Amino acid sequence: MANKKSIDLTVNIGKLKLKNPVMTASGTFGYGDEYAEFVDLNKLGAIVVKGLSLKPKEGNPPPRIVETPAGMLNAIGLQNIGINNFIKKKLPFLRQFNTPVIVNFFGDSIAEYVRAAEKLSAADGVHALEMNISCPNKQAGWSIFGTDPKVTYKVVSEVRKAADKTLIVKLSPNVTDIGLMAKVAEDAGADAVSLINTLTGMAIDIKNRRPRLANIIGGLSGPAVRPVAIRMVWQCYKAVQIPVIGMGGIVSAEDAIEFILAGASAVAIGTANFISPKITEDIINGIESYMAEEDIKSIKALTGAVQC
Amino acid sequence: MNRLFQASVINNEKLVKDHYLLTLHPLEKIKKPKPGNFFMVAVNKGLDPLLRRPISIHRWLDGDFQLLYRVAGKGTSILSRNKPGDILEILGPLGRGFPLNIKSENIILVAGGLGIAPIFALAESLAGKNLSLFYGARTKTEVLCTRELNTIGVDPVISTDDGSLGGKDNIVNVLKRHVTRNPSLVTDHVLYACGPGPMLKALSMFAIKYKLKGHIALEQNMACGLGTCLGCVVKTSKGYKRVCKEGPVFSIEEIVW
């Protein structure tokens, strides 16, 4: 059994060196402050904050969430305080910690993405950017940026020119060929891809025959999506050279290791933060114990180590 | 004090069909909840149901506490099977409770169904003031806590949907009739309420019409209870607010129905 002190949990994502592979998934950890009471934020690999846009966004009408078997559907509608408020009100708190801050962001046009990326690149204390491309494109009849390879290439390459910080592209799983989308992001200059965002879904109340979400359609997350996410991470790992950040229903160290074996260099914990606010720390400890038991010295050795 | 704690079940008493009174002993010292605060209770360690269940504080017993709940689905059904000695993992107290620091000596309390759970906690905290409780339930057997209410000197006006106890009417109509007969009921009074959405809506319309100030405790689907998922919002005059963080207690005029 390896001595815990000799275990190397560090991973590299673009220019970032993370002390361990466990990050938070955007939208499930707020702006970090709400969780500081439960988790030592210094212990995390990275903090990924709630998705931001140039202007604050009000979000969708309620009900916005509904529980489904081993999962939940959400249609929050990207409610956020806006990039300026984030930089003024939330970033000073996050700068106190010795943990990289990754800002998830989105826009409804390529120009908006670029302006957002410029602002975030200039902000001290933002270490990397994660582009959410699962949102609608105003100029193209509200079709999704992340489902048309040509549009994906265009928006990522434009943002790449505007951002010198590490750029992660968060892929939509609602596509036919996820490996192709990862390759497009890589070709457009992304330093890493993260996946999966939520799978679109729907639930109906059979008594009143109405959708359970006011928005009708929502995004499914939680353990219910995990096998889909594992498969997609594996396909992306085979398709690209850049690091893959895996997420989708991780609730334990075992789940995280499954993602790493499928090809993830790092993992993000999402819905599980809602169930247990200290789960990220538990998962980091669990990964370390697993490595000690299995006598693995470096977590990097596990990435993509599934034997097919 | 840690807001994520374990508690052992002292008792999980079935009061009447589907209604349970859960008495818990925290294994460490916890923050004393205010009436209107709630706890997120993990009903199981498995993945289905996935989320904790938000349940408001019913009674604080000097370190131990009680939750009053109704079996409404899978989660509460699992919760109802807990036995004395079982350990539950709980998050809380959470949210903003009822304001207790009020000048008025005259309080109107309105409870609909399980809304009695936090309203009882409130009545206990406000004991000594002039409390008028209007309490509506579906049927006689679901009128709970009447003995405990009498102990703190509260004699509720009751109505039931089926007329099996009190008048056969909804409790907002009952309150309206009381006010029509005795308009002084709304002068210098403060209103506090908890109950189903339609009841709170009708009550709010009535309160605004009669310029009656007060607060209501709301319910909403909720994932985290900590303000991060943004799933539990309600529409207010100042945009969407989170039931778990800015609520669950809101001032009546704030909510946009």
Image (tube, rainbow, N blue to C red):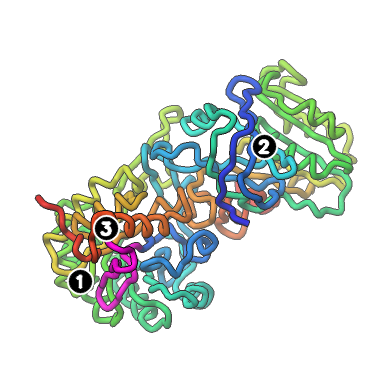
Give the number of the disc on residue B66: 2
Q: Return the residue at label 1.
A: A154
Q: CA–CA distance between discs 3 and 1?
A: 49 Å
Residue A284, relative to residue A228: is it above or below?
Answer: below
Q: Is residue B37 magenta?
A: no
Could you tell me residue B218's position as x and y percent?
62, 44
Q: Are marks 3 and 1 on the same chain?
A: yes
Q: Residue at x 89, y 42 (%)?
A: B128
Give the number of the disc on residue A1: 3
Compared across the picture, whether B36 is left or right of A82 comes to right
Mark 1 or 2: in front is 2
Could you tell me residue B33's position as x and y percent?
69, 48
Split into 4 quadrants, where in the image is the N terminus of chain A? bottom left
Callout 3: SS: loop
Q: Amino acid at mark 3?
A: Met
Mark 2 or 3: in front is 3
Residue A35, relative to residue B117: is it above or below?
Answer: below
Q: Residue at x 55, y 61 (%)?
A: A37
Q: Amino acid at mark 1?
A: Lys
Q: Are marks 1 and 2 on the same chain?
A: no
Q: Residue at x 30, y 47 (%)?
A: A200
Given contact means CB atoms under 8 Å apart, are the residues at marks 3 and 1 in contact?
A: no
Q: Is residue A144 visible?
A: no
Q: Chain of mark 3?
A: A
Q: Are marks 2 and 3 on the same chain?
A: no
Mark 3 crowd level (few <14, some 14–19, many ≥20, 10 Å Cα): few
Given contact means CB atoms under 8 Å apart, are the residues at marks 2 and 3 in contact?
A: no
